[in-house]
Image: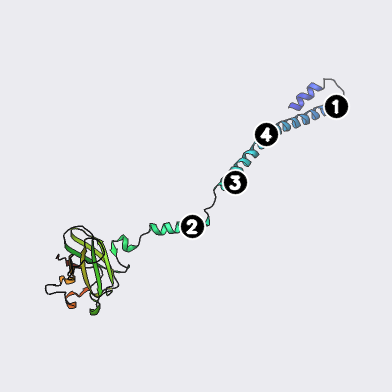
């Protein structure tokens, strides 16, 4: 429709055939020129958008690279310290359960009664079922110590395995980790034995202190003060 309008405008009525042909040629050239102008106008408006997009993408990539460069890896020399801290943050099972001794699957709970005060420690000495080692120097399997609790002090110790053992207990009131004795060699601190074996006539016999310990078993010892 636009071509017809231009033809009517550019070619007056009554013009010759040649003139009308020239007029149509002028119209076609004009249409081509207008089309090129519109394409050029579109390109001019689009190019700034493309040109602006490139710097934005480059800036984003550069920012990401800067962040990656700024996040430095942890030096390898710090890893041993991290492992040490992790290990320190995870206590042994025996400690977390309040039991003393080398961790094992067998535990014995010793209820030490008649504790007069909370001074010092309660020491529980474990002996194997070997007569000659009972109360002998370096004859014990293990000595467990816990803070004294007035009244009854409950002590949990790990045993090598279920079996027959003997116990000797004393109240280490000054916490010097030994049983204080008088000049005659008599105990100056409270003491007791498994099965509450009698000490009326001296040290108890080995047969009187032996007992069978099972996993999570209990034993009671009543202290005697001099």
First in sequence, mark 3 or 1: give its number: 1
- First along the sequence among labels 1 and 2: 1
- Say how the picture is coloured: rainbow
**Percent x, y of residue 69:** 58, 47
- Residue 169: x and y in percent read 21, 67
Give the label, 2 or 3, closer to the camera.
2
Q: How crowded is mark 1: few (under 14 residues within 10 Å), some or many (20 or more)?
A: some
Could you say where residue 199 lies in the image, as x and y percent from the top left? 14, 72
Report the number of numbered marks: 4
Q: How far apart are marks 4 and 1 (CA)?
A: 40 Å
Q: Earlier in the sequence, mark 2 or mark 3?
A: 3
Q: In this figure, which residue is indicated by the disc labeled 1?
A: 22
Badge 3: how crowded within 10 Å, few (<14), some, or many (20+)? few
Report which residue position mark 3 lands on: 65
**Distance from the alpha carbon under mark 3 to that under mark 4:** 26 Å
Asked if the residues shown at circle 3 and circle 1 are in contact, with their CB atoms under 8 angstroms apart, the answer is no
Q: In which quarter of the image is the C terminus?
A: bottom left
Distance of label 2 from label 4 (alpha carbons): 52 Å
Residue at the image position 43 percent from the left and 59 percent from the top:
84
Q: Nearer the viewer, residue 172 or 15?
A: 172
Q: Which circle's residue, 3 or 4, is located before the other in the chain?
A: 4
- Sequence-earlier tag: 4 or 1: 1
- Between the C-alphas of marks 2 and 3, the distance is 26 Å
- Is the residue under label 4 in contact with that under label 3 (CB below 8 Å)? no
Q: Which of marks 2 and 4 is in front?
A: 2
Do the numbered discs 2 and 4 sit on residues whose CB atoms are within 8 Å? no
């Amino acid at each position: 429709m636009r071509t017809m309008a231009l033809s009517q405008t550019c070619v007056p009525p009554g013009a010759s055939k040649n003139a009308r042909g020239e007029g149509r040629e002028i119209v076609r050239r004009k249409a081509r020129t207008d089309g090129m102008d519109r394409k050029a106008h579109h390109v001019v408006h689009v190019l700034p958008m493309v040109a602006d997009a490139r710097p934005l993408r480059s800036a984003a990539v550069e920012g990401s690279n800067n962040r990656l460069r700024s996040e430095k890896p942890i030096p390898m020399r710090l890893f041993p310290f991290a492992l040490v801290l992790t290990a320190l943050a995870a206590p042994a099972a025996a400690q977390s359960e309040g039991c003393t001794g080398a961790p094992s699957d067998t535990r014995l709970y010793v209820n030490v009664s008649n504790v007069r005060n909370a001074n010092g420690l309660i020491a529980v000495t474990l002996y194997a079922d070997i007569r000659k080692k009972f109360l002998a120097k370096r004859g014990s399997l293990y000595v467990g110590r816990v803070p004294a609790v007035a009244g009854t002090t409950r002590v949990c110790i790990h045993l090598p395995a279920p079996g027959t053992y003997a116990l000797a207990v004393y109240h280490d009131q000054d916490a010097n980790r030994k049983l204080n004795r008088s000049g005659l060699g008599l105990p100056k601190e409270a003491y007791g034995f498994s099965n509450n074996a009698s000490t009326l006539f001296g040290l108890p016999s080995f047969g009187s202190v032996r007992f069978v310990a099972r996993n999570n078993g209990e034993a009671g010892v009543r202290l005697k003060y001099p």
